[in-house]
Image (cartoon, coloured by chain):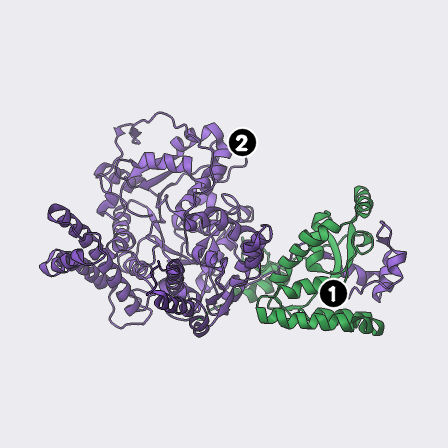
């Protein structure tokens, strides 16, 4: 690319060796063989990494040709919003960001900064009771302990307790129970008051026990639909996942398809499937108690190398009971996975989430409900702070693996890995929530980057390696020096089988077999176990890295963002096209995983933090609008996962 | 019902603003790409000699030695070796062409990798070699408030971290062309 800055000549090294590097434009024009000073000026580039701007046209169809201006402030002003799943990754970030945007000093900018959502009415948080820990205690512990609330503490200081007491009401309940597990009084009050329910709860384990998956991902959706139906004016924002699309290729549009299966099974009825799965659970539970399984468990208990070996009497019975629980869990996990794969989903998670969507399509028709499908939700870019991540999420274990000596990842280089920062998801949720309140929503929104700002697997793998490289370069020692030179590469499944973990495992096994007659412990048992884990992990992620070339259209949320008033676009706008993946991966995502997630994978504690105490005002009974005191409570049921 | 592409309508409105529906702004839904601002009367500062002694081949060798695959590393190392041998003759013939040929070795390396390796090269190799006297002169010049443009024969992937380090906003450096994020070697 011109101009080419050629090396200095031999004599210039002597002539221009002084400390003053100033040279006149005319001299540069001559030296570079340019036509004039203008050509020289046009060669100047900013000293920052510039990504080519991605410009995508937004196409409106007919009746929505000119959307009316849209104001989030106006829509959410004075509204009462209930968040379900606040203890989860997305729920916590949404709450923290919303708290950061609140201004307790009213609509005028106060000492805490410009008001963003000054008139929001009330936030209700539905939290389950956990054994002896009531919902309120869980909430306070979460606020005190989670780093995601650091900026909130920083912003409000001692006044945070008062703000939370004023703006937030913790409601004990369980969304997997009918009536959301609320007592009748609270339920009646919420049905009357609520404007919006955000359901960010979900069991995101890929292959969980079917009972848990059904309760959290499907039953809860049905209970929420019923709650909305009985509500005065509440709308529902239901969080699902883009990957309900299942095992298929191509563009995934923002259209709800009732009774959908990726295999396009004719006569598939999602509701019947839901009932059938519940029947399966019941029959498995009955079978677990039956004589056949009992006999099998007894045999197992007496078997070699079993924990119950040598037990008798009550101890044996207890052991068999434990084994029965395990048997049932394994059986239901396997059955759910088998059924999911049979119907075209890669795992139970996406299968049950899709069933929930079908239930919404059927039972939620005519109700103000929007399904929101985020793709793979990852580290925050800016809010609540740059580089927040939590738990071992989708890409964490894979990216960790790529930072080890493991080099060859079976993947489709051209497949787009659809990652979206959690703060973009939360911004989208706020927008869509406001649209729901104003009843200008679409039935389905996808929050994804594969169309707006694609990053394919080849690039993702390289960026992950480069992210690790930056860290290793700063360390000392032979191990890091070696790791620095071990870049991960995308390979075909065949090459992976031939040269990577499976082949290495076979070699290790052979060595173990040869050495087995020797009177010593198996020297490579740990390596073999590690390779097995790698194989299992890669197998689990294959649908997301090797198969299914999805392109998730995410136009609806962009249309909402475009409709925002200019001053609100800056604050509430949704933008994923402007993300620079290099910066995101290397400066934000990998360092965040290294800080918040890798210690968990390695079984190390997270970095030590100074404990902080939330000063909440003394508890008072909740007052109803007419001034009567009433108890908020639960029927004692619990919410298992969020 | 036929879909309507509002893009056409929006484009038309720019010239026929009066026809825009009431309440609609005349702003395009697609913002034109921002114009690249440039300093008005900058001072050009040659990096080589004043701040660093930078050779052409050594950074290229560093980039090639850190290619993604072992095969690419071996192949590019061989090419760099060949360049080292041919360089005097190439430069004697045509310095511009010679520079382009050296850069051709980077064909197939991604921009992502070059950006990170450029940072690394600067941070760990070039930074300790910065000349104190030259830095003092540059700081004094910056203190007068003029816009400084660093000019260097190095690749922009290395020059950007240097400029950032020196709080300089503009550079003129050798640049590669990229297609889909991959250097095409030109």
Could you tell whether A450 is left or right of B27 in the image? left
Q: CA distance from mark 1 to mark 2?
A: 58 Å
Give the camera-side residue of A318 and B119. A318
In percent of the image, x 11 and y 61: which residue is there? Answer: A292
Give residue A303's position: percent from left, percent from top.
Answer: 18, 58
In percent of the image, x 45 and y 38: which residue is there? Answer: A149
Give the chain coloured green.
B
Asked if residue B16 shows in the view, the reply is no
Give residue A269's position: percent from left, percent from top.
Answer: 24, 66
Give the chain coloured purple.
A
In percent of the image, x 39 and y 40: which residue is there? Answer: A79
Could you tell whether A348 is left or right of A26 in the image? left
Q: Which mark is residue A110?
A: 2
- Chain letter of the residue beneath label 2 in the structure image: A
Give the camera-side residue of A570 and A497. A497
Q: Are marks 1 and 2 in contact (CB under 8 Å)?
A: no
Could you tell whether B186 is left or right of A182 in the image? right
The number of numbered discs placed on residues in the rendered structure image is 2
Q: Which mark is residue A542?
A: none
Are discs 1 and 2 both within one chain? Answer: no
Secondary structure under the numbered disc 1 in the rendered image = helix
Measured along the vertical axis of the image, is residue A138 above or below residue A498? above
- Chain letter of the residue beneath label 1 in the structure image: B
Give the camera-side residue of B167 and A518. A518
Q: Which mark is residue B57?
A: 1
Give residue A203's position: percent from left, percent from top.
Answer: 32, 53
């Amino acid at each position: 690319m011109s101009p080419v800055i050629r090396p200095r000549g031999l004599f210039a090294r002597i002539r221009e060796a002084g400390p003053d590097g100033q040279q006149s434009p005319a001299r540069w024009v001559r030296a570079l063989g340019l036509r004039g000073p203008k050509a020289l000026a046009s060669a100047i580039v900013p000293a920052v990494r510039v990504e080519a701007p991605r410009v995508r046209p937004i196409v409106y169809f007919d009746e929505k040709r000119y959307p009316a201006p849209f104001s989030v402030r106006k829509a959410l002003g004075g509204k009462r919003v209930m968040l379900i799943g606040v203890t989860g990754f997305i729920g916590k970030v949404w709450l923290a960001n919303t708290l950061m945007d609140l201004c307790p000093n009213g609509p005028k900018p106060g000492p805490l900064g410009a008001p963003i959502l000054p008139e929001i009415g009330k936030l209700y948080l539905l939290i389950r009771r956990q054994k002896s820990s009531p919902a309120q205690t869980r909430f306070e512990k979460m606020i005190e302990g989670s780093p995601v609330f650091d900026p909130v503490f920083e912003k409000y200081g001692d006044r945070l307790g008062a703000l939370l007491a004023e703006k937030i009401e913790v409601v004990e309940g369980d969304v997997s129970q009918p009536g959301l597990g609320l007592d009748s009084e609270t339920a009646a009050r919420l049905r009357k008051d609520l404007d919006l329910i955000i359901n960010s709860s979900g069991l995101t384990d890929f292959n969980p026990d079917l009972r848990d998956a059904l309760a959290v991902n499907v039953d809860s959706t049905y209970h929420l639909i019923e709650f909305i139906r009985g509500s005065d004016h509440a709308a529902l924002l239901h969080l699902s996942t883009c990957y309900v699309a299942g095992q298929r290729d191509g563009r995934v549009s923002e259209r709800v398809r009732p009774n959908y299966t990726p295999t396009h099974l004719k006569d598939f009825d999602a509701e019947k499937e839901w009932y059938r799965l519940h029947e399966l659970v019941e029959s498995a539970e009955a079978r677990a108690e039956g004589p056949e399984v009992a006999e099998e468990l007894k045999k197992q208990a007496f078997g070699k190398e079993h924990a119950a070996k040598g037990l008798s009497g009550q101890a044996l019975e207890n052991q068999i009971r434990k084994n029965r629980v395990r048997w049932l869990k394994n059986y239901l996990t396997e059955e759910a996975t088998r059924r999911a794969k049979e119907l075209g989903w890669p795992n139970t998670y996406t299968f049950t989430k899709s069933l929930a969507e079908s239930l919404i399509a059927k039972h939620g028709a005519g109700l103000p409900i929007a399904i929101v499908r985020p793709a793979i939700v990852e580290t925050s870019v800016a809010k609540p702070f740059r580089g927040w991540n939590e738990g071992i999420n989708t890409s964490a274990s894979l990216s960790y693996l790529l930072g080890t000596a493991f080099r060859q990842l079976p993947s489709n280089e051209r497949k787009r890995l659809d990652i979206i920062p959690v703060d973009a998801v939360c911004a989208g949720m706020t927008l869509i929530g406001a649209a729901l309140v104003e009843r200008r929503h679409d039935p389905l929104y996808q929050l994804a980057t594969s169309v707006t700002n694609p990053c394919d697997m080849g690039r993702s793998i390289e960026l992950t390696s480069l992210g690790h490289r930056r860290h290793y370069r700063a360390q000392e020692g032979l191990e890091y020096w070696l790791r620095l030179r071990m870049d991960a590469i995308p390979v075909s499944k065949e090459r992976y089988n031939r040269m990577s973990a499976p082949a290495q495992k076979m070699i290790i096994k052979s060595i173990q077999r040869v050495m087995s007659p020797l009177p010593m412990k198996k020297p490579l048992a740990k390596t073999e176990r590690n390779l097995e884990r790698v194989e299992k992990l890669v197998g689990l992620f294959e649908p997301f890295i090797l198969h299914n070339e999805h392109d998730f259209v995410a136009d609806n949320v962009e249309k909402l963002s475009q409709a925002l008033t200019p001053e609100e676009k800056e604050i509430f706008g949704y933008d994923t096209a402007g993300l620079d993946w290099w910066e995101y991966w290397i400066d934000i995502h990998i360092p965040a995983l290294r800080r918040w997630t890798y210690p968990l994978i390695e079984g190390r504690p997270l970095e030590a933090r100074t404990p902080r105490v939330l000063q909440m005002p003394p508890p008072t009974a909740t007052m109803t609008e007419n001034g009567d005191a009433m108890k908020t409570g639960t029927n004692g049921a619990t919410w298992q996962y969020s | 019902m036929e879909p309507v592409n509002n893009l056409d309508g929006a484009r038309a409105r720019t010239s026929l603003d009066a026809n825009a529906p009431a309440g609609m702004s005349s702003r395009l839904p697609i913002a034109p790409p921002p114009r690249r601002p440039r300093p008005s009367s900058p001072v050009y500062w040659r990096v080589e000699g004043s701040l660093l002694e930078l050779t052409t081949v050594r950074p290229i060798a560093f980039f090639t030695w850190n290619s993604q695959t072992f095969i690419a590393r071996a192949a590019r190392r061989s090419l760099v070796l060949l360049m080292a041998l041919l360089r005097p003759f190439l430069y004697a013939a045509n310095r511009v062409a010679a520079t382009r040929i050296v850069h051709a070795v980077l064909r197939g390396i991604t921009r992502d990798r070059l950006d990170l390796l450029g940072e690394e090269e600067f941070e760990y190799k070039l930074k300790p070699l910065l000349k104190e006297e030259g830095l003092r002169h540059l700081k004094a010049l910056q203190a007068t408030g003029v816009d400084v443009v660093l000019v260097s024969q190095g690749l922009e992937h290395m020059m950007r971290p240097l400029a950032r380090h020196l709080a300089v906003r503009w550079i003129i450096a050798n640049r590669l062309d990229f297609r889909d994020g991959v250097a095409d070697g030109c």
